[in-house]
Amino acid sequence: MHLDPVSPDNVNAKRLSEIASLEVWEGNRQVKLKTLFRIEEDRSETSQEDLLEITGDLSRARRIGYKTTAGTMLIKGHGGLYIGESMSGGRIIVEGTAGSWLGLNMRGGTIEVLGGAGDLVGAASRGATKGMAGGSITVKGNAGSEIGEWMQSGTIRIMGSTEMFSGVHMLGGTLHISGGTSGRAGAHMKGGKIVVSGNLPAILPSFSFEEVRDQTKVEKDNVPGPFYVFSGDNNEDGNGRLFTSVLNNPQLKWCEKYLET
């Protein structure tokens, strides 16, 4: 299902009959939204005027919240692929899990996922070289590979762990991984900041050791260390920064012999 029209600022201003008649793609045919969902209006005193709530298993859905600019969307279940693609404002909350390409080409707004997410969070479209350029993404669980690929600005927080190539081709912004990451973090990085509070098995040889810091910041939040700090990727003449926990990475203790005494 391609659910491009399903976003708060596209739905909330419409009557129920208009929403029901929106056309979406199911496979290779267009159908009206009312054939896929039961559409209701919440008229309770506690309802939010700008809230769009979707309940169900949308694991096969694509592009929910496409180009969202305002309002709030609450997804109760699996949200599918491309949630919040090209989003520039508003808020999307996923109470379940999200598929790959969460926040693809995002420009602003906020996405929160209470479960895990797939690959390429905050990334660029395949073949493009400009990814997330603003806003904030938080994933409470684990995420897949290539998180923040071609990221330009904004903040991504992964509260769990990630797979390979976190921050690959990163140009700017901040990526904080509270857990560990499988490896090759920051490959081809030219700018931005990656903070790994858990384990990172090895640092790419194209990064230079800079210093040890007691803590660092992710937006306005202090993140306690201490951290080994590296710069790179030198293969790309990059000036990005990679912070990785001293306590959770004893295999990197060799760095300390380069500290001035």
Image: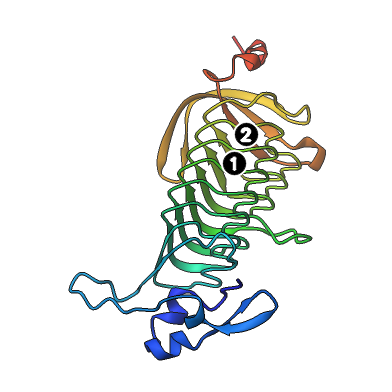
The type of residue carrying mark 2 is Leu
Residue under the image location 62 percent in, 54 percent down:
100
How many callouts does the rendering have?
A: 2
Q: Position of residue 187 (x, y in %)?
A: 74, 39
In primary-sequence order, the first of circles 2 and 1 is 1
Q: Secondary structure at mark 2?
A: strand
Seen in the picture, residue 15 relative to 82 is either above or below; the reply is below
Marks 2 and 1, Cα distance to the nearest angstrom?
A: 6 Å
- Please name the residue that numbered disc 2 is placed on: 242
Q: Most extreme residue toward the front, as rendered?
A: 35
Residue under the image location 28 percent in, 76 percent down:
42
- Please name the residue that numbered disc 1 is placed on: 193
Left or right side of 115 for 121: right
Left or right side of 261 for 77: left
Q: Is residue 123 in sight in this rendering?
A: yes
Residue sitting nearer the eye, 38 or 261: 38
**What is the quadrant of the N terminus in the image?**
bottom right
Q: Quadrant of residue 103?
A: bottom right
